[in-house]
């Protein structure tokens, strides 16, 4: 399925008829600063059990494992009482454009379950928060800093507006929590304004990222912020606006879905036999504790995720209760320097996927 330029989604099927199980992974990766890597990030390098390279854990290992599982099922002529539909996407890292296009083209209409191979390691995720990026723009008037009365300081108004937005966010989210996903997360990540110290700035911007839950929709949050900024503009000489740049809703799959139960049954023996050092175990436990998630080194726990997947686009019409699971080889080194994945875990996941894809239709 062609997209813009030389990019394209890939759709492949195995088997026929109902039910239809979708499996998915994205083909794009994030940018890289080669100077901070110990190896060439665009050439996979093996060091013991570790495979290094940009995208090896997010998520070329999961996508490759899904594809190889399909190929081996095809070569072995394994009978399937349904259809496996591979949806390999472009542009997940920048707005989930590929998944959006596949959904619009109808590839999810007859799907009964979806497995996404994002890096979870020996955990299975069935829910994730939504993502919303906001740009707050303050427009003033430039002037010489010795004569501020001739200008209108855009940074001054931006700072005031951000304080008011934080107060409004605290007010609207107090006591609002999802049993699976927890609370809404709000971060001011980028601020820009002014060009020299002796000039009143005529413009300033801030970029805000939120991770959202079903109880407080993205659009409801923006509506509250717009009201706050309108009130501020009316009682001051400021002109501050907010614009939604990214709008991805939260997703809560079936808490006891067929895919989750299958993954746990088939994957637990692999999790129990994995080779993990005490240092690696302590690191994983520490990371998950910071994320308020449970941890077990010997069994696959069903958990939620603070991050998002293409599932938000695939299931935009079924955001609650769908048979949705995120399960793939990898670790928490995605988007980092010296990104790596475990070779043995990657090979184990091929075998796990083959069993899950077969038994899903039993």
Image: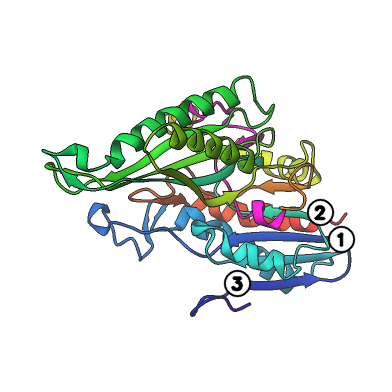
Give the side of residue 238 with respect to residue 153, left or right: right
The residue under the point 37% across, 39% down is 238
Q: Secondary structure at mark 3?
A: loop
Residue 128 image point, x, y percent = 62, 41
Report the residue marked by disc 1.
Answer: 19
Relative depth, front residue between 163 and 71: 163
Q: How many marks?
A: 3
Magenta stretch: includes residue 292: yes
Q: Secondary structure at mark 1?
A: loop
Relative depth, front residue between 272 and 55: 55
Marks 2 and 1 sit apart, C-alpha to C-alpha, by 9 Å
Circle 2/circle 1 CB separation < 8 Å: yes
Report the residue marked by disc 2.
Answer: 360
Magenta stretch: includes residue 342: no
Residue ranking furthest to the top: 175
Crowdedness near tag 1: few (<14), some (14–19) or many (≥20) residues, C-alpha within 10 Å: some
Query: From the viewer's perspective, is residue 190 above or below residue 31?
Result: above
Q: Nearer the viewer, mark 2 or mark 1?
A: 1
Q: Quadrant of residue 101?
A: bottom right
Query: From the viewer's perspective, is residue 6 above or below residue 317?
Result: below
Q: Where's the N terminus, which quadrant?
A: bottom right
Relative depth, front residue between 194 and 307: 194
């Amino acid at each position: 399925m062609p997209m813009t330029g030389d990019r394209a989604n890939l759709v492949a099927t195995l088997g026929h008829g109902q039910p239809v199980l979708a499996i998915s992974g994205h083909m794009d990766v994030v940018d890289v600063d080669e100077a901070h890597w110990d190896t060439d990030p665009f050439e996979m390098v093996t060091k013991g059990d570790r495979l290094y390279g940009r995208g090896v854990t997010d998520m070329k290992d999961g996508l490759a494992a899904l594809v190889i599982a399909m190929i081996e099922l095809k070569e072995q002529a394994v009978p399937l009482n349904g259809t496996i539909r591979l949806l390999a996407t472009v542009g997940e890292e920048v707005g989930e454009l590929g998944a959006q296009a596949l959904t619009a083209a109808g590839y999810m209409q007859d799907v009964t379950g979806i497995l996404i191979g994002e890096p979870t390691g020996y955990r299975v995720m069935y829910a994730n928060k939504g993502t919303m990026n906001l740009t707050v723009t303050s427009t003033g008037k430039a002037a010489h800093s010795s004569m501020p009365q001739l200008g209108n300081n855009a940074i001054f108004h931006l700072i005031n507006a951000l304080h008011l937005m934080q107060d409004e966010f605290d007010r609207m989210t107090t006591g609002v929590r999802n049993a699976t996903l927890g609370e809404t997360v709000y971060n001011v990540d980028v601020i820009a304004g002014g060009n020299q110290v002796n000039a009143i700035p005529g413009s300033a911007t801030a970029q805000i990222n939120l991770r959202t839950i079903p109880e407080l929709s993205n659009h409801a949050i923006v509506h509250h912020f717009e009201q706050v900024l309108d009130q501020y503009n009316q009682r001051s000489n400021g002109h501050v606006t907010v614009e939604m740049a990214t709008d991805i809703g939260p997703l809560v799959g079936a808490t006891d879905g067929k895919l989750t139960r299958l993954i746990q049954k088939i994957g637990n023996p692999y999790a129990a036999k994995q080779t993990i050092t005490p240092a690696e175990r302590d690191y994983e436990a520490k990371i998950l504790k910071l994320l308020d998630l449970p941890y077990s080194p010997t069994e696959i726990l069903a958990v939620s995720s603070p991050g998002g997947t293409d599932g938000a686009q695939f299931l935009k019409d079924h955001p609650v209760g769908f048979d949705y699971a995120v399960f793939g080889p990898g670790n928490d080194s995605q988007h980092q320097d010296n990104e790596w994945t475990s070779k043995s875990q990657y090979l184990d996941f091929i075998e796990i996927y083959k069993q899950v894809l077969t038994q899903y239709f039993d």
